[in-house]
Amino acid sequence: MNLDALYAKLLVKTDAKMVLVVMDGLGDIATLDQCELTPLEAAKTPNLDKLVAAGCAQGRMIPVAPGITPGSGPGHLGLFGYDPLEFEVGRGVIEALGLGLTLQPGDVCARANFCTLNDKGLVTDRRAGRIKTEVCENLCAVLAAKIKKIGDTEVIIKAGKEHRFVVIFRGKGMEGPLTDSDPNREGLPIATVKVTDEKSAKQKKTAKLVADFYKAALPLLKGRQPANGFLLRGIAHQPAIPTFDERYQLRAAALAVYPMYKGLSQLVGMTKIEGPQTIKEQFERYVKEFNNYDYFFIHFKYTDKAGEDGDFAAKTKYIEEFDAALPILLNKMPDVLAITGDHSTPCAVKGHSWHPQPVLLHSKYSGSDKLKRFTETGANQGSLGVIEAKYLMRLMQANAKMFDKFGA
């Protein structure tokens, strides 16, 4: 029997409340430069410490498979209980949904970053110095005013936060996924977008459209500093994916600030709760909405941003900022609470990595690992062991008493 089919067969409906809190990129590694500490170990976290003392199970999670570095899409889909190797979703689709755009069948979406190019066309900053959102909006308006169609294909451009925006190609006979134009490091030119299936005429048409879009758009950005170029990632169409309600029989809500994470939650049928901009406001809104949903996904971005910048002090500070707001949630404790990251973003790596992220699970039935803190070192000793992230949702359901016994 298929494992998902078995979980569905054993499913028991309860009134339990579940919360998944994702501190993006939380996991890290200890190095000599960091006094052999991770930011989670260096941070003062009295409220997390209190939660651990109340009884929790800890462990580490592999986001996709050993040695594979995940993007945010696969990282979160795994946390939601969807095997990221089975459900592949382009980042452009996620970002478009998160920005509130309605997709049509056949739409191909790309997530874009404004970047900085030198006079030789080499990328010197993949994020254009994280330009302000207002600058991004102005640049997107310039592009959108001049590029409305390429041949018979409509082009839709929508600004996101800071350096990010979305491009949608709307027409007939297109398909993804395509490779990224992002070279993934500085010092290289914008990569040529290529098909992933040489037999697909639809992919070939889409790749040509992307190339034509670059020919039209780059001259419009020439001389604009620091954002005089752009990189496209996650070029794909929207796949079919079962919703949270279909899969788990749960009314689910998402409290996220950044469009991508709103899009990820919307993709699996969660209700996007708009408004809160800080983790304190997100926790306050969770309390207000407590009776309206069975499951809450709460996303905190800034640990990941600091890790990508290689800023140990900032990542430590953001963990402490999160911890200071945590009592708001703990005063309205759900039946099951999980706190983790979608992946690791070590400061030493300055990017996502393959290192398993730490996870904390608290419920009436989770037991206590008798640890003093929530850290990578402590998680290595926890009773959850090292598991695949796709099983976290199933463990949360088990702790909510949502499964009947298997077999006699």
Image (cartoon, helix red, strand yellow):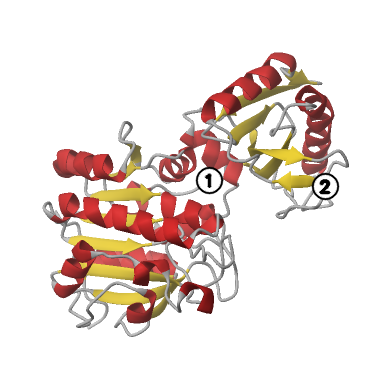
Measured as percent of width and height from the top left, residue 284 is found at 20, 41
Tag 1: amino acid: Ala
Evaluate whether residue 11 shows in this view: no
**C-alpha gap between disc 1 and disc 2:** 34 Å
Displayed quadrant of residue 110: top right
Q: Quadrant of the C terminus?
A: bottom left
Tag 2 or tag 1, which sits nearer the N-term?
A: 2
Picture layout, residue 222 above or below residue 399: above
Q: Quadrant of the N terminus?
A: bottom left
Measured as percent of width and height from the top left, residue 116 is found at 72, 39
Evaluate whether residue 239 shows in this view: yes
Tag 2: amino acid: Pro
In front of the other: 196 or 184: 184
* Residue at the (15%, 74%) spot, across then down: 53
* Residue at the (20%, 72%) spot, across then down: 52
Crowd tier of the residue under label 2, counting other residues whose Cα lies within 10 Å: few below 14, some 14–19, many 20 or above: some
Measured as percent of width and height from the top left, residue 39 is found at 40, 66
| 128 sits to left or right of 18 | right
* Residue at the (13%, 72%) spot, across then down: 54
| 106 sits to left or right of 336 | right
- Mark linked to residue 165: none
For disc 2, the marked residue is 189
For disc 1, the marked residue is 240
| 136 sits to left or right of 274 | right
Helix, strand or loop for disc 2: loop
In front of the other: 152 or 63: 63
Helix, strand or loop for disc 1: loop
